[in-house]
Image (cartoon, rainbow, N blue to C red):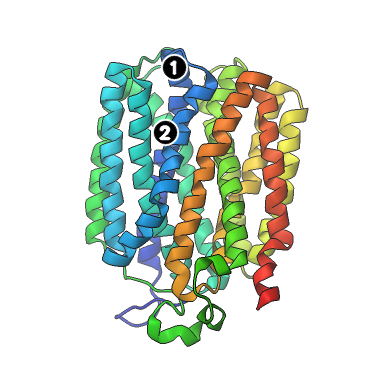
Amino acid sequence: MKMKNNNGGNRYALPLVIVGVMFFAIGFALGINSYLVPLLNKALQISSGQSYLVIAATFSAFLIFGYPASLVIGKIGYKKTMALSFLMFAVGFYLFIPSAKLESLGLFLLASFISGMGNAFLQASVNPYITILGPIESAAKRMSIMGICNKLAWPVAPLFLALVIGKSVDDVVLTDINLPFYIIIGVFLILGVLAYFSPLPEVKAAGEDPDSVEDCPYAATKTSIWQFPHLLLGALTLFLYVGVETVSLSTLVDYANSLGLPNPDQYAWIASVGMVVGYICGVLFIPKYLSQAAALKICAYIAIAGSLLVVLTPATLSIWFIFLMALGCSLMWPALWPLAIAELGRFTKAGSSLLVVAIVGGAVIPTIFGFLKDGVGAQNAYWICLPCFLFILYYALSGHKIRTARQ
């Protein structure tokens, strides 16, 4: 992979800082859901399955807008698409205010969907951008740095809402969210302006230019993204991964509330700390001591162990083992993304859009979790994670190698 830089040389520091802020914004926007789920469950007197539809609405936008986002990037570039995404975020966040006033689940879902649209466009921009910003072999290291920014933001969102509202989640009424959302809207609009005027250089993957096909001979003979088995399996793996990661990050407040633990909003940090610990390991060990595939394999084993401990240990103890699930999830995204888009050449943007579409797993798996919680209880609902982690282990062991065998 290469970066075109008119100033000469590879200058990654400033782009890493700017994109890191954007990854933080992505995590913050998704972390809002972990506060809204138990709030809507109580305020609207709906089932857990119905309240988890808010997460489904957010992530369903990836299914619809993943591919259009790649077309927009192709037309206006990465940087302007990033700026546009923050405007979409602001519109979605604004709709939460009338949603609370009207106590309308339908309007909450619409607001979540529009903010999810902003997230889809931003994810479609920043993930391939940071992957091809430098050598593909160290992509997981850069993604790990971005992951720290992203996952630290997940618990910040519910903690920010709780701080500004000044009440326990059990005492909050829907209209209490108005003030924090006005603040969030203002911040995201400022971020959009900063993104538009930021000095981010446009980047291209090797072989992405029509006149440089020889840089990626594997892709030169292909006519569509459907001819890359490692990409297709990677998209399915990413679908499952995003689903279980979202379960790990978004269910802690709700799970603590179900267990009757005091101050349930304070449990949101457990998964995020696990993720950050893993990302720090990624920064330190990839690629010098660990390959991206090896990191994915190790993380899959850790996540499988964590998911078993969550469902098999006493309930009040089990919540702490979500740390291990999250630790296992940590390097999955940084490892999966570069493994899946490796050697796509001129199909890099299209392949990236397919991976963005796969983020819809964050809508499907948590929704199944919510309805399982209604049927078999909160702790047993975590069984949904085990088969997902087992498939991720398959991709780490052999799925990503199908490209190499065919080549």
Number of numbered discs visible in the structure rendering: 2
Picture quarter containing residue 399?
bottom right
Closer to us: mark 1 or mark 2? 2
Picture coordinates of residue 379, whole percent (x, y): 68, 25
The residue positioned 71% from the left and 37% from the top of the image is: 307
Dot 2 falls on a residue whose secondary structure is: helix
Dot 1 surroundings within 10 Å: few (below 14), some, or many (20 or more)? few
316 or 244, which is in the foreground? 244
| Residue 160 horizontal side relative to residue 379, left or right | left
Quarter containing the C terminus: bottom right
The residue positioned 27% from the left and 54% from the top of the image is: 83
The residue positioned 27% from the left and 40% from the top of the image is: 90
Judging by the rendered image, the residue that carries numbered circle 1 is 168
Res 290 seen here:
no
User: Residue flagged by tag 2: what amino acid is it?
Assistant: Ile
Res 83 seen here:
yes
**Extreme residue toward the right, this view:** 312
Picture coordinates of residue 50, whole percent (x, y): 49, 23
The residue positioned 62% from the left and 59% from the top of the image is: 233
* Above or below, comparing residue 86 to residue 353 in the picture: above
266 or 192, which is in the foreground? 192
Picture coordinates of residue 386, whole percent (x, y): 71, 40
Judging by the rendered image, the residue that carries numbered circle 2 is 32
* Above or below, comparing residue 290 to residue 322 in the picture: below
Picture quarter containing residue 183?
top left
| Residue 124 horizontal side relative to residue 193, left or right | right
